[in-house]
Image: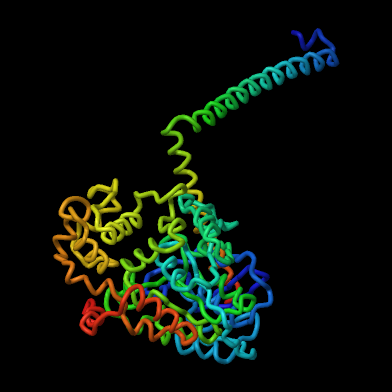
Amino acid sequence: MRVSWQSGTLTFRLDAEDEITGEAADGYPVKLRTNSCTLRGVPDDAHPDLFAVAAWTIVAPWTRRRIVFDRAISAGLAEALHAGWGIEAGPVGAETRPAGRTLAVSYSGGADSVAAAAMLPDAPFVHFQRVSHPRVPNRWTHYRADVLAKLARETGRPLSTVQSDLEFTLAEPRPGYPEHHAVAAGALLLADRMDLGGLAFGYELGSRWLGGDRYLLRYTPDNPMWAPHGAWGRLFAAAGVHIVLPVGGVSEAVTMRLALESPLKAQVRWCLRGSGGPCRTCGKCLYKELIQAAVERRPLDTPITPERPVARKWQDPPPYGGQEMIEYGCARVPGIEQGVFARAAAHLGATEESTEWLERCYPPAIEEIPEPWREQVREFVVANVGLMTPEQARRVEEWGV
Amino acid sequence: MMGRLTPSRVRSWLDARYAARIELAEARKEIDELRASVAELQRQVQALSTAKPVDQEARRLATETAEALDALLQNEVLLWQAVERA
């Protein structure tokens, strides 16, 4: 792979052994569409390691053996690429970028990143906004990135919005981040200007420790995407921007509660489709409605019926992505025996007692937060959430085993 | 008979007039056909904005065009890879 940056435009060319099919770090199969993309409003003069990591978030799935950057990187960054992926990277010749002092929040506006923001009231936001790609007809106009960007502005926090078409470099399964970390490409290029030493993501207990979403669905202490000692954690650290997961030890029930109690409550939006409010009809709205109803201890309020395609997976037996939250919701929502989640609830047989651990924080998640920000997060968690008992922590460690 | 009675100059003038008249008639016919097809296109465009089946047809064409473009973009990547391998 050979990559070059011209201002904010990244162009890459495949070497003989590279392919337009590959896997993201979570093992999900992906396919390339096109080999250029642009990040708007980013500086030209960021440290070369920042350009390199930003590029790697976009080209990693297609690269097989080596990568050549258009500017020399540090030896430490080349070593992190080799240790993490077995990739030879060069040319080598730059000084290491020391970590800065500021922690920014990679802010999407969903409940998880709002909860992370609530823990870090002084942290500036970096928001990624999808824009169209000049070479790809936009067939996904239901995705309202403009609405999410407007809500981010309304938070009143110091905000850098980076507009980019990088998601359109991905053809399959659909436009999206080639690697989950591509959401941070703009923040990486802004890292020198913002003096960043860390970037906080809203990845919670399920994503970090339970192999949630499209990942393994089992306890993942060595999660390659989000563990500090994983391939991506070491790569970001080598560029002086640590991956920080303030809500990495708490479930989506806790992030939901913290978001709804937060000063940013009016700006919370997990739905990517609605313009005047959440659409209430997409799969994500249904999943989050279950969690919100459980947190508020009220019946489910949804127009979705079991026959609808978005509800189909809940008619099948487990395992489910985010299953811990389905258990949590089914154990707490009154009247769950009827409607969309009736079958899932019967399969799971969860109780309030069996899901109590999802209301506390898994302590090792705090220990892996880098030292400059650890105590601040610990204090917030102890005051507002509480730590899991050893027995509850075992529920995390035995998940899916 | 005519060939013998009329001088060749007059005959060629008559021939030219006859040919011109046919050309004119053909041109008129062509214009009429064009006018009809423009009217038909206009009707289709108007129908596109109102009638549902035609709208779906346009959507199908748009989707297939975009998918074809995806394949073209992927081919471009592979072609550059082949060029630089050589």
Report the number of discs: 0
Outermost residue toward the front in this view: A383
Q: Is residue A307 visible?
A: yes
Residue A287: quadrant of the picture: bottom left
Name the foreground residue: B48 vs B13.
Answer: B48
Q: Is residue B86 visible?
A: no
Residue A2: quadrant of the picture: bottom right
At x 49% / y 88%, what residue is drawn? A82
Eyeballing the image, is A108 above or below A190? above
At x 63% / y 82%, what residue is drawn? A48
In this rendering, position of residue B55 left or right of residue A204: right
Name the foreground residue: A117 vs B50.
Answer: A117
Residue A127: give x, y in percent of width and height. 53, 65
Q: Quadrant of the N terminus of chain A?
A: bottom right
Residue B3: give x, y in percent of width and height. 77, 12
Eyeballing the image, is A114 above or below A65? above
Which colour assignment does the render follow?
rainbow
In this rendering, position of residue A140 left or right of residue B30: left
In this rendering, position of residue A327 left or right of residue A101: left
Q: Quadrant of the C terminus of chain A?
A: bottom left
Name the foreground residue: A228 vs A107.
Answer: A107
Eyeballing the image, is A190 above or below B24? below
Name the foreground residue: B73 vs B21.
Answer: B73
Residue A382: give x, y in percent of width and height. 35, 78
Residue B41: give x, y in percent of width and height. 56, 29
